[in-house]
Amino acid sequence: MTMLFSFLTFSLLFLPFSISSSPNYIFPENHFINCGSDSPIVRNRRGGSTTFSGDLNFNPHHSDSVKDLTTTPESAGIYQTARKFTKSGSYNLPIDENGVYMVRLHFFPFVSLFDAKFSVSASGFLLLSNFSIPRNLTTSPVIKEFLVPVLKGRNLEIIFRPDSSFAFVNAIEAFVTPQGFIPNSNDTTHVTSSKNDLSSSVLNVIHRINVGGSNITDETDTMRRKWVADDDYLLIKRLAMNHSIYSDEPKYDQVGGATQYDAPDLVYKTAKEMNSSHVETQSNITWRFDVKRNATFFVRLHFCDIVSVQRNGTVFNAYIYGMFGKPISPYDRFEQFAVPFYVDFVVDSDGSGFMNISVGPRNDSKSINAFLNGVEIMELINDRVEWSGEKKNNVWIIVGSVVGGVVLISVSVVVILCCLKQRNAQPVENSSWWPRMSVNAGSSEDRTTVRTPIGSTTPDMNLGLKISFAEILHATNKFDPKFMIGEGGFGKVYKGTLHNGVKVAVKRSEAGHGQGLMEFQTEIMLLSKIRHQHLVSLIGYCDERYEMILVYEFMAKGTLREHLYSSNEDLGKSSSRSELSWDQRLQICIGAANGLQYLHAGLREPIIHRDIKSTNILLDEHYVAKVADFGLSKSGQPEETHIVTDVKGSFGYLDPEYLKSMQLTQKSDVYSFGVVLLEVLCARPAVDNLLPRNQMNLAEWGLSWLKENQIEKIIDPFLVGKINPNSLRKFGETAEKCLQENGTDRPNMMDVLWDLNYARQLQHPTMPQQSHEDTNSDVSWQMALTGINRLPSINVSTSCVSVADSEAFSELKIDETR
């Protein structure tokens, strides 16, 4: 995880049982193209056959037909020939029906096609960029599959553009899918970080899994899809078992159910279910899939109850990343056994490079079981390009360019002569016609003046913080990989040193990451206006040309999480690694609470952070805590009680009230901070999918022990016997109050700050304050706290509030509470 920031943006779209695809759908005959050939190839499929016709009728420009002379058509089929492009060229496919089109591109680089690197677009969407096939994968075809929205009357143009010497393709499939095959997001409730309209986005198929069964070939699938067996994706194999194959046919075409085109019956006739020999643990079955970091995915989970012994017997939950996703109760929707259906999600990946999908039993189920039949994971693509499939050397363009050049030169000569005339007419000492040279370190070609494909920054950006790209290159030794200290949702983070010797953390945006221009602007505009000892300082930014770079003060000790626990991806588990003393942990929590309190109550326009977590609390060389990552923050007027906005945040830290209502409040930050308090106490992640179901979510698990007054049983083993029981009790009470389901029942950050200082005082009643601890020279504590007999909740509006180990806390009695 990144040392500076880790952007784990969460979004989850809960769809009802999906409306099934049209039962009147007939598999189309167009377009199936045997590229580079004038001969058709017939390929069998379930329910019929498909003919791949030659491509000569499409007449692709700037291309050649190539053939593998070492094979025969019978053995190689559509992979014996290919269309090779030396310049940008396209296939223009006529479309006579609106809808989502399945586009499959087949690549098999025989000898003359090695080392190709190219990009592909369809209907203006960028499907593949700098695509190449590693030599170790050249022994079998590579098939890339996309779902592309196309409007009637607009041809489906598929463009191949070489990025090096040439591009190629062996075969193309492009046909319309059944109506409703991909749901329209406008008909659903959005609880997402961004409103992605599925009907206007391209979907790139990443995984298609037959759970509980074997591989399914394109010859046996109704829409020529390939499905892979799930065994290699199971995290803990002993927790699951294959259910015996269902001997009858699934009951398709039920209202609200699936059709044979949504998935073949081989998917619905097999399933994974809980292993009966391990049911007593009630652990979830979890699959882990490789996915792109910080991208948005459409996930379809297929279900068909072929496992229940009795009707209404199996009710369970489906989870993504360990978060509650959807209750699965087949008989609430259908009255029959073995009716196939699916549930759709839109979810942002968490930056780990993996996606965990789980099913687990519910306490209200008559049968302690859970099952899954199939999984599809598709990445949303919204990147647009404007390419021409044909480069034309138009003589009029050439003539126009020449004439334009002549005119430009003529105008330039006239301007220069006029300027010289004016200069000669002026006294030398008043001569001021020369252009004023910019003293700004940044290039004149930056995003504040020139539009770029990424966008342009707002006019009121703080130009005083601008740092030149040349300075960035110097600081990071040209982004030397040895200097990289982390990677998050915005991009990679590098340690650097500016010319003046200041050590900095440089966060450089990368295309394809989940956060971009909006977060870049938000961070600059917020952090350029605020300064606080417990907020990470923005040193500057760079927006020259295509760059979006943020430069922060360097935090030597990294993230709080790094000092609490480590994640072992190979073993699939996390483990405590902390050696922070209890007092150090309390100081860190107090520092972070100070920073949050300043955001909530110390500014003219309060700020809600919206992504509080242990990776966004950084530590300097003295372990002083500072809150970081303001890319998701929201500001508002003091009188506003809430902000209605899309849900953003991180798994395990999200305020449940915010999730339900989409109303963001300061108490949402308080909830997230409560999860951090439990992380500090227990030294474990906010979500751990490999633990038993009742332990996966730290907030729920910790609350259950807090309510039983047995929190000492779940603390970090390193702390056992080292915490004053009164301090532990007060800390636990504080966390419990922060994690209340209703925001009105939670304390404000001032109350939290007070309670944490009190917990520290209970640990060490007479501890002197260190010089680097919670001090703030530009702010004074404005409340009289001496002689305390009662401690009511206090709301304070100051320019900044910092509660430190003051004399007030030295007078607190052990039995007093707030």
Image (cartoon, rainbow, N blue to C red):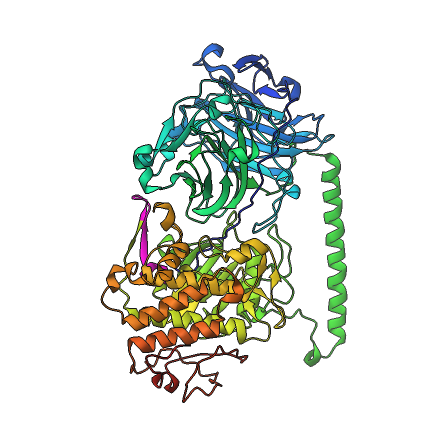
Magenta stretch containing residue 780, yes or no?
no
Magenta part of the protein: which range? 560-573
Give the residue furthest to the left. Answer: 721
Residue at horizontal 64 percent and vertical 19 percent from the top: 26
Describe residue 415's horizontal placement relative to residue 325 as left or right.
right
Residue 572 covered by magenta stretch? yes
**Residue shown at 49%/64% (left/top)?**
669
Q: Nearer the viewer, residue 774 or 120?
A: 774
Q: Is residue 38 visible?
A: yes
Residue 414 is situated, as x and y percent measured from the top left of the image, at 77, 60
Q: Position of residue 383 (x, y in %)?
A: 59, 43
- The number of numbered badges drawn on the structure is 0
> Percent from the top left, x then y, of residue 88?
60, 32
Asked if residue 466 shows in the view, the reply is no
Among the 4 quarters of the image, the one containing residue 395: top right
- Assign the N terminus to one quadrant of the image: bottom left
- The residue depicted at 60 percent of the width and 16 percent of the height is 54
Look at the picture and state if 355 lies above or below 273: below
Q: Quadrant of the C terminus?
A: bottom left
Q: In the image shown, does 183 or 268 lie closer to the viewer?
A: 268
> From what the image shows, is residue 774 above or below residue 524?
below
Name above or below for residue 138 compared with residue 487. Answer: above
Q: Quadrant of residue 536?
A: bottom left
Q: Position of residue 93 (x, y in %)?
A: 66, 25
Q: Say left or right for 792 vs 174.
A: left
